[in-house]
Amino acid sequence: MAIEYLYTINSDDELRKIYYKLRQISKFLEEKEKEGAKLLPGFSNLVCDIFCSLYMINPKVKTIEEIDPKYFINLTIMNGLILDPSYETIKEKTNFSRSTALWATEMYVDKLLKSLRSRKRNIKYFHKKNTDLNREVIRNSLEKRNTGFFLA
């Protein structure tokens, strides 16, 4: 299914539907997604991934082979999020809690947007080179935990 290549977290349609219903009541996320879409293609999908990773008990990040090359940066960002020291602490409180996971998503989206704004030129370069990048180079970077993109 082609839509699966748009998301970096192994989540199902039902969980994504939960997020998109909750997003409708969060004016903050609606606003931030519009802002993020100007900086990063697929930003809405990335925000959904953030929510799913916080809501699920044991979220699994997809492999690079399972991701459309246009979304490699989302994979890098999700790996950076999961490596963020505050993630595990917050994650303990968000498992299976829609409202807490939504709140934490809002917090991380705000932090992510600040990081993206400060790295605007890097993002454009990454997307320009994205199609030329060897999957092996990105895989090695992820395996070495050299993501760090998420952190401001």
Image (cartoon, rainbow, N blue to C red):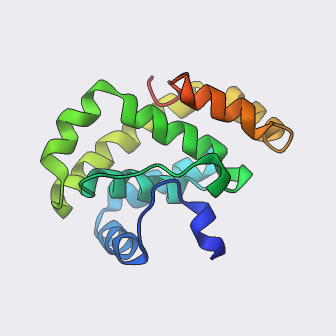
Q: Quadrant of the N terminus?
A: bottom right
Residue 83 percent location from the top left of the image: 38, 29
Q: Is residue 28 left or right of residue 140?
A: left
Q: Nearer the viewer, residue 65 or 36?
A: 65
Task: Say which residue appears at 63% left-offset and 47% top-offset.
Answer: 64
- Horizontal side of 1 relative to 11 (left or right) equals right
The structure residue drawn at horizontal position 25% and vertical position 29%, both measured from the top left corner, is: 86
Residue 31 seen in the current view? no
In the visual, does 71 lie left or right of 11? right
Residue at image coords 52%, 38%: 77
Q: How many marks?
A: 0
Between 110 and 82, the one lying in front of the other is 82
* Residue that protrudes farthest toward the right in the picture: 132
Horizontal and vertical percent position of residue 78: 47, 42
Compared with 89, 64 (above or below) is below
- Reply above or below: 7 against 105: below
Residue found 41% across the figure and 51% down from its top: 60
Q: Position of residue 115 (x, y in %)?
A: 49, 29
- Residue 65 visible? The answer is yes
Of 17 and 143, the residue lying toward us? 143
Above or below residue 144? Residue 77 is below
Quarter that holds the C terminus: top left
Q: Is residue 7 above or below residue 12?
A: above
The residue closer to the viewer here, 143 or 83, is 143
Left or right: residue 37 versus residue 103 is: right
The image position of residue 95, as x and y in percent, is 18, 54
